Amino acid sequence: DAGNPDEMTATLQVPGQGQAGCNEADLAEPFGVLDLGDLQAFIAAFTTGDLAADIAAPFGVLDLADVQAFIAAFTAGCP
């Protein structure tokens, strides 16, 4: 139920599909704005092994480099 305040949805950006975000940290709508939705989307992807969180080398592996790259992109902000 979309009206249930106990439920939350997030839309993940899959590279090469749909609208592009402003940088690697812009994973959730609204694109072009970095917000809590992007942080939640990254954490959800990373903890479930979703390669949408694989934004740094070595690609194909989720590791600390991906977390550091997300933090750097998020704190850099959107142009």
Image: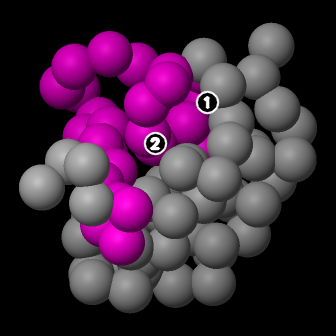
Q: Quadrant of residue 1?
A: bottom left
Nearest the eye: 1 or 68: 1
User: Which residue occupies 65% across, 53% down?
Assistant: 36
Of badges 1 and 2, nearer the viewer stands 2
Would residue 54 be seen by someone viewing this image from the given angle?
no
Residue 30 x/y as whole percent: 49, 25
Q: In the rendered structure, find residue 8 and report the number of the disc placed on it.
A: none
Q: What element carries label 1?
A: loop
User: Which residue occupies 38% across, 62% down?
Assistant: 5
User: Which residue occupies 66% across, 25% down?
Assistant: 33
Residue 77 x/y as whole percent: 82, 32
Inspect the image, locate mark 1, and give the three-letter code of the amino acid beneath it.
Asn
Q: Quadrant of residue 25?
A: top right
Magenta span has 60?
Answer: no
Q: Is the magenta stretch mostly helix, strand or loop?
A: loop
**As drawn, is 52 to the left or to the right of 65?**
left
Note whether 76 is above or below 17 in the view shown: below
The residue carrying mark 2 is 27
Inspect the image, locate mark 2, and give the three-letter code of the amino acid beneath it.
Leu
Quadrant the C terminus occupies: top right
What's the magenta region?
5-31
Label 1, label 2: how far apart the Cα atoms are: 8 Å
